[in-house]
Image: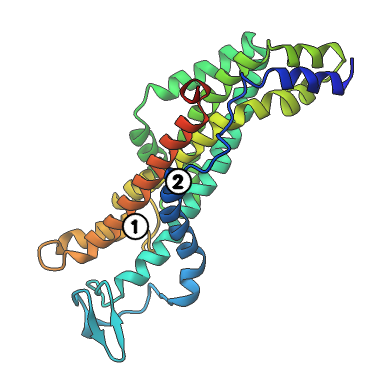
Amino acid sequence: MNDVNVKTVISNESEFIPSFKKQINWKIVLLSLPVLLFVLTAIFGPMIIDFNPVNTDTANRVLPPGSKIGDEISWLGTDQLGQDVLAQIIHGARISLSVAVATVLIGGGIGVVLGLLSGYFGGWVDAVIMRIADIQLSFPTILLAILIAGVLGPSVTNVIITLSITRWVTFARVVRSATLTAKNKDFVDSARVVGASHLRILTKYILPVCLSPLLVVVTVQIGLVIISEASLSFLGLGTPPDNASWGLLISLGRDYISTAWWISVMPGIALAILVVCVGFLGDTLRDESDPYLNN
């Protein structure tokens, strides 16, 4: 038996491997549009609207949305330092999305590797990894993040490290579950018979089975990471003041909520829209990839 035979067995297991419907799901398309808009804003926005966190303009402080400053219009008003709120939100989108993507890549990568090893080898490897995961899950995620961030100090890099440490468990448990189900399937047994190495089996035959549930987890975790980063920044444990994070903007504007509500409300609305759209997108992808719901 060779790889051709193994692929034949895999094709017979198509009902096991989750797959997305071939027709267009307009709900996914509609939910993806706001997310794509935020991504494009984070990438190209700072190239269009300049923002310097050091510069202040006290003559134009706490101006309401739509105020005219010289020949330009401040569409979302200015803050207590005279800085444009829209420019801060655009730059804050870059920080929030960068932290979310980096956290998912680092924490998710660690979780995927540990989940594969835990589910495939079992025994003491599974026991050690899962007991560490259980111990970490016994602590509330946000409290653990506050503890780690308090030790490391405020910076974008430290926020990524903190959130990666708190998020790998979710990826590991999802991948472990998928691996436990897949490792005894016929196509994996066929790969063992032809002498495939453990690394080849894990990467070529088991990892593809984990991709659909991983896609859903990644989508959901991006929203949760954005909230966690905003929470840490709001508490002064996230990004430093020279980085316009959404959580930091909300925190700095809370003392002016009665007189200049737009300072906190505008970044809060941007945060809510992105997180809600990402959350609904994750739920839709989960429903779309579930073979039982599709039947």
Left or right side of 1 for 54:
left
Q: For this rendering, which residue is in front, 119 or 31?
A: 31
The residue that mark 1 highlights is: 246
Rendered view: 252 above or below 19: below
Classed neighbour count for the residue bearing mark 2: other residues with Cα under 10 Å, few (<14), some (14–19), many (≥20): few
- Quadrant in the rendering for residue 195: top right
* Residue farthest along the top direction in this orientation: 123
- Quadrant in the rendering for residue 58: bottom left
Type of the residue with mark 2: Trp
Would residue 16 be seen by someone viewing this image from the given angle? Answer: yes
Q: Residue at x 45, y 47 (%)?
A: 159
The residue that mark 2 highlights is: 26
Q: Secondary structure at mark 1?
A: helix
Classed neighbour count for the residue bearing mark 1: other residues with Cα under 10 Å, few (<14), some (14–19), many (≥20): many
Q: Residue at x 64, y 11 (%)?
A: 122
Q: Secondary structure at mark 2?
A: helix
